[in-house]
Amino acid sequence: MAKKQKETQQSLMMQRIKESLPKSISFVDELSEVLKLSSDSAYRRIRGETDLSIEEIATICKHFHFSFDSFINNNDNSCVSFSHHQLNSHINSFKEYLNGMKSNMQQILRFPEEDRRIIYAAEDVPVFQNFAHPLLSAFKIFYWNKSILNAEGYEDKKFETAHIDKELMQIARDIYDLYAKINSIEIWSDDTVNSTIKQIEFYWDSGAFKSKTDALQVCEELILMFTRISKQAELGIKLDANNKPATNQKNFELYHSDIMIGTNCVTTEMGSHKSAYISYHSFNVMLTTNASFCNETDIWIKNLVRKSNLISGVAEKQRYRFFKHINDMIKKLMDKIEKE
């Protein structure tokens, strides 16, 4: 009886792995590479003839972002396991965070264009959107490290555009280039844009900018970001960092919600495989592939979309008003900086 239960759980794990792979990827080849096994040894584990070892289960769960608890508690919808990358004050922590984000994007892009999608209910402007603009990326990374993580070496620093970590900027740019190729739906509220504007204003008021010029340049790049997003909403196609269409197919929908979103919530779809990302502690993220939780999150987001207004495509009047209000807020802040 124990053997049958063990095989059932192993079979469930193997099915989950298979579902997480594009159809063009060989299941046995992928498992062989991940576990460093021969094809024959991988086949035996897939068929349940050889039990997975604890070490192999741990390797699979880490590589495919699964939690073994989700297999043990498969019929218990009240128990949901999350994985997360814990950021800390070490200077390399944020680089690891960005590389993990880049890896996730690369994984999604392994699937055919029609089988991959990201839906982003945005309390803040989706982090990927910032990464198309180097000065804005630099400011956000500086702010997160200095004000949220208390990262080493940032204690007495002031933000200046002359000192930008080129390696981090390149990783951020890579992330945006990958995101631009993925079919996406973004849901924004009136509060979505406030956090970045307030961060810039807070840094100006607290003397955390090296100069007035640095503060104004970040504001100018913020305007460029919203101009780009407005344009891609008009086209229904994401633009790359050079403002060129990133694909030949429609791949972007933008909604405006009158309902407060409350937290950044992201779902990804790769074929039939779904994941849900929930933000916490400013920009840390928890990830789960629990089917029940992902389906519940999907229902919540679809309900949010139904109650929101589509401002991409032909909704020219609504889109104009939405982005004009954003630009007015930024220009008001720029006027304040200019006068002080």
Image (cartoon, rainbow, N blue to C red):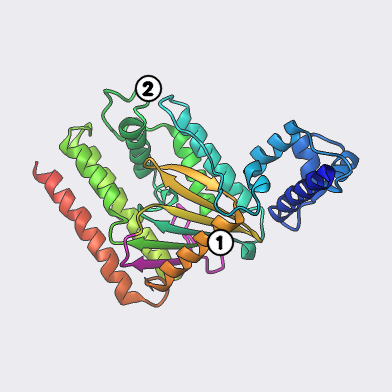
Q: Is residue 30 left or right of residue 208?
A: right
- Is the residue marked by circle 2 packed among few (<14), some (14-19), or many (20+) residues within 10 Å? few
Tell me, yes or no, if residue 181 can be seen here. Answer: no
What amino acid is labelled 2 in the image?
Glu
Q: Is residue 192 left or right of residue 292?
A: left
Say which quarter of the image contains residue 215.
top left
Place of residue 297 in the rendered image (x, y in percent of width and height, measured from the top left): 50, 59
Residue at mark 2 to residue at mark 1: CA–CA distance: 40 Å
Camera-nearest residue between 253 and 61 = 61
- Which region shows up in magenta? 236-260
Place of residue 330 in the rendered image (x, y in percent of width and height, measured from the top left): 22, 53
Residue in view at x 74 percent, y 38 percent: 34
Residue in view at x 41 percent, y 52 percent: 264
- Is the residue marked by circle 1 packed among few (<14), some (14-19), or many (20+) residues within 10 Å? some
Camera-nearest residue between 270 and 237 = 270
What amino acid is labelled 1 in the image?
Asn
Q: Which residue is mark 1?
A: 295
Q: Are marks 2 and 1 in contact (CB under 8 Å)?
A: no
| SS at circle 2 | loop
Residue in view at x 44 percent, y 38 percent: 169
Above or below: residue 292 compared with residue 172: below
Q: Main secondary structure of the magenta part?
A: loop
Q: Which residue is mark 2?
A: 152
Q: Is residue 231 left or right of residue 331?
A: right
Residue farthest toward the left in the current orientation of the protein: 339
Between disc 2 and disc 1, whose residue precedes?
Answer: 2
| SS at circle 1 | helix
- Specify the quadrant that holds the C terminus: top left
Camera-nearest residue between 294 and 317 = 294
Residue in view at x 64 percent, y 38 percent: 62
